Image: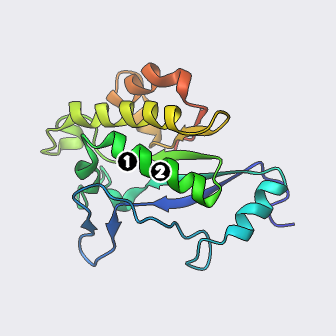
Amino acid sequence: AQMEAYTHVLVSFAVTYTWAPGMNQCNEQCDLIPVVAVCDNSPQPGLVARWRAAGKKVILSFGGGEMGGSWDGLNDCWEHCFGKEVHLAQQLAAIADRQGFDGINIDYLYYYQDGQRGSSFSKGAEAQTFLRVTTLELRERLPVGSLVTHSPLDSDLLPGTGYFEVMREVAATVNFIMPQYH
């Protein structure tokens, strides 16, 4: 009954780090933790199956602020995935298949432009390539009918930003965008 009113369930997060106090321990090869916990620190295949049987689309979210957020720049795990988009998309598609997810959400909250928010970040072109290529690779690797979504910060979708331009370029491959208001 708790999920009755909903059409989509977002499971968070597939990540490439191990949490550590102060700064997370990033996997330099952009290897994902291979099994995503859904509830109670467990993959819960029966729960995912029940949601899907009830007509819910269950989407796995990749990333999140602990991979690195542009508000503080503390964690930089995203940077270890720049240039490894095919490897990442292969892993995400495999997890989606293995755990029964209907698609992948990219929850990228990190820098995407040089000097963004007064930072010393200088990999804007690489970040935008990462967003573009990962989106396209997911669309290619996931089964027909799968969802590919993004959930950036609302301010990252302003016309003229690098993220906005990437979304315009890949619009035909993205099912929907879920702006986050922090």
Identify the residue at horizontal 27%, vertical 57% (top origin). 77
Picture disc at residue 153: none
Return the residue nearer the eye: 169 or 140.
140
Residue 180 visible in the current orientation: no
Q: Amino acid at mark 1?
A: Leu
Identify the residue at horizontal 34%, vertical 61% (top origin). 16
Give the CA distance from mark 1 to mark 2: 6 Å
Marks 2 and 1: in contact by CB < 8 Å?
yes
Q: Quadrant of the N terminus?
A: bottom right
Is the residue 2 above or below the residue 135 in the image? below
Q: Secondary structure at mark 1?
A: helix
Return the residue nearer the eye: 89 or 75.
89
Residue position for label 1: 88
Return the residue nearer the eye: 1 or 41.
41
Q: Secondary structure at mark 2?
A: helix
Location of residue 84 in the rendering, given as x and y in whole percent from the top left corner: 28, 43
Identify the residue at horizontal 28%, vertical 48% (top origin). 81
Residue 140 visible in the current orientation: yes
Location of residue 162 in the rendering, given as x and y in whole percent from the top left corner: 32, 28
Identify the residue at horizontal 64%, vertical 33% (top origin). 144
Is the residue 168 above or below the residue 71 in the image? above
Quarter-wise, where is residue 153 in the image?
Answer: top left
Tally the marks.
Answer: 2
In this rendering, would 172 be left or right of 80?
A: right
Picture disc at residue 92: 2
Q: Amino acid at mark 2?
A: Leu
